[in-house]
Amino acid sequence: MYSNILRHPGPTPIPKKVELAMAQNMISHRSEEFVKLYRETTERVKPIFGTKQDILLLPSGGTAALEAAVVNTVTPGDEVVVITVGAFGDYFVSICEKYGLKVHNLEKNWGEACTKEELIDFLKPISNIKAVFATYNETSTGILNPVEQLAEVVREHSDALFIVDGVSGIGGAPAEMDEWGIDILVTGSQKAMMLPPGLALLAVSEKAWKVIEANGSTAYYLNLLSYRDWAAKGMTPNTPAVSLIMGLSAVCDLIEEEGGFSKTVERHNVMKNMVRESMKALSIELLTSDEFASPTITTIRTPEGLDLATYLGHLKKKYHLDFAGGLNHLQGKVFRFGHMGYCFPSDVLQAVSLMEAGLQDFSYQFKPGAGVQAAQNVYLSSIRK
């Protein structure tokens, strides 16, 4: 049986080295071996976040870490701002409303980023904001929000914490948590971090720790103070995802073998440009502008004259190429091409080639090979520099 070529925004393909690491014999999460694994691995992850703060590991999906960021920093009745640029910004709104917060929602059209100027104008009439929540890389639209600029606005125009969902960006997009002034940064294992689902990674600034300490959260499983206390011992308060942490150590190996995280970021930018230029060569529209395009996922409008569900089903059945469809009101109107984590320019060339084969099957009018040639040109240009 053929395995599908998974070009999704998560879960994403797992490197063989990571699979083998996760297949090691189990160890106790209260053993000296685990303490060594935990401390060494979390230290090695820090450059991916751009922080000197401790990396906390939660045995959960990314959504639980987003909830932890909310429940530990604010209390019912507090006022917060949520910057929404797609489906996963809406997650933050739902979590905040569930905890009884007064939410001011800066909502953008799907496919647009939030600019520095828009956030300044939005914050002006609002006082007593306790936190501003934003999505760095919006999985539903392929937008990369300018969080460095947004963090600057939050610092200059409020005393609020700036809390960022980096679930589909961290590991593929540049992140400088400390330098940019992000107070809590969250990601999940199953996207650019090249792991199966089930592990969330989170870092907290000194400013945010002071707020959390004063807040006195009633959370039990998601109590970040508890995670901080246990992290000092090289452990977690509850049973961790031991095998995933073994895999995370192997992910760090792979990043180091590539030449360091800056090289990983470069690869993702090359793949982004390959996908975008190939679609332009095929006269297929993209949802987002080049300026705010994600390095880990590209959202592509339905090729003219095609029934998207039929086309995607055909690609998967005949060519074993598996893309993700659109979410919510974009369902049937766009599909999402994931190029994150364990994905390389050769994988992009393969996917574009199979896309072209599928388009020919549906008699879509284009110059055969145009998309592949455009992607190849981007790649060759990158390696000749």
Image (tube, rainbow, N blue to C red):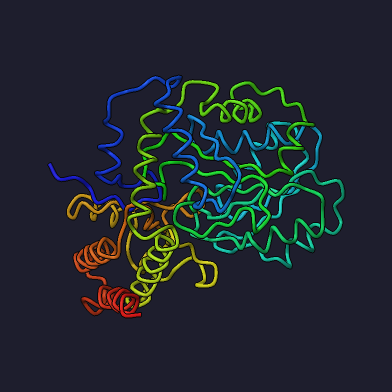
Indicate the quadrant containing the C terminus: top left, top right, bottom left or bottom right: bottom left
Residue in front for this viewpoint, 85 or 155: 155
- Extreme-left residue of the structure: 1
Residue in front for this viewpoint, 144 or 228: 228
Q: Is residue 7 left or right of residue 63?
A: left
Residue at 39% across, 40% down = 248
Q: Is residue 74 left or right of residue 58?
A: right
Residue in front for this viewpoint, 276 or 381: 381
Residue 320 percent location from the top left of the image = 20, 51
Quadrant of res 150? bottom right
Residue 124 percent location from the top left of the image = 84, 59
- Up-down relation of residue 262 to residue 314 (above or below): below
Residue at 48% across, 65% down = 287
Q: Is residue 351 left or right of residue 131?
A: left
Residue 131 percent location from the top left of the image = 74, 45
- Up-down relation of residue 108 to residue 375 (above or below): above
- Up-down relation of residue 30 to residue 164 (above or below): above
Indicate the quadrant containing the N terminus: top left, top right, bottom left or bottom right: top left
